[in-house]
């Protein structure tokens, strides 16, 4: 199991115990300039206090386990308005939302698509890219996807961020 997978497992347990969903974990750099980013969500949105609670718990667990040898910066935040779609369940959950999608390999000369996410059935993501044209993409061929920020989001959502240098 890789370092990132072990960290993800710890963060997922902490997030679940606090009623939150782990969206993603990123580890950038190494040595004292390393940054560990944790993105969380919950139906009512993430608050600054939520970020603080998870930051303290995860930081303490990582320190006890001595998983990251050098100093690092721990950032805990909401995924933001342009949230990444990481897991297959995300494609079903956010059906009806506008998304940007990039493929690993170009299709019909294009790697990037934008449209209305129609959902996911089995391993196929369906997107209405406009003019009545619906495209289907196998989950495995998607390099990355994220929501398109719209200015009438969830009420009460916060984009709080907690940073902690360790």
Image (cartoon, helix red, strand yellow):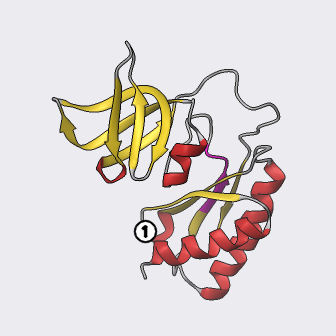
Look at the image and tell me in which quarter the N terminus lies. Answer: bottom left
Q: Residue at x 74, y 64 (%)?
A: 54
Residue 43 location in percent, x, y?
A: 76, 46
The one nearer the camera, 34 or 96, is 96
Q: Is residue 52 left or right of residue 122?
A: right
Q: Residue furthest bottom?
A: 65
Q: Residue furthest front?
A: 121
Q: What kind of element bears circle 1? A: loop
Q: Is residue 25 magenta?
A: no
Can residue 71 be seen here? The reply is no
| Residue range of the region highlighted in magenta in the rendering | 74-79
Residue 59 picture quarter: bottom right
- Asked if 158 appears above or below 123 in the picture, the reply is above
Can residue 135 be seen here? The reply is yes
Residue 30 picture quarter: bottom left
Q: Residue at x 61, y 87 (%)?
A: 65
Look at the image and tell me in which quarter the C terminus lies. Answer: bottom right
* Residue picked out by circle 1: 30
Residue 26 location in percent, x, y?
A: 49, 59
Q: Residue furthest left?
A: 109
Q: Is residue 77 magenta?
A: yes
**What predominant SS class does the magenta segment belong to?**
strand
Residue 99 location in percent, x, y?
A: 48, 31
């Amino acid at each position: 199991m890789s370092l990132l997978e072990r960290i993800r497992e710890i963060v997922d347990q902490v997030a679940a115990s606090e009623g939150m969903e782990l969206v993603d974990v990123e580890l950038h750099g190494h040595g004292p300039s390393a940054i560990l980013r944790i993105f969380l969500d919950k139906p009512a949105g993430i608050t600054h206090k939520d970020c603080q609670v998870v930051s303290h718990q995860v930081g303490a667990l990582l320190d006890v386990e001595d998983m990251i040898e050098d100093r690092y910066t721990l950032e805990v935040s909401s995924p933001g308005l342009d949230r990444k779609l990481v897991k297959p369940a995300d494609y079903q959950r956010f059906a009806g939302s506008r998304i940007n999608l990039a493929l690993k390999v170009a299709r019909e000369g294009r790697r990037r698509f934008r449209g209305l996410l129609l959902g996911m059935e089995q391993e196929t993501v369906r997107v209405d890219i406009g003019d009545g044209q619906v495209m289907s993409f196998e989950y495995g061929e998607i390099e990355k996807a994220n929501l398109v920020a719209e200015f009438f989001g969830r009420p009460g959502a916060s984009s709080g961020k907690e940073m902690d240098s360790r």
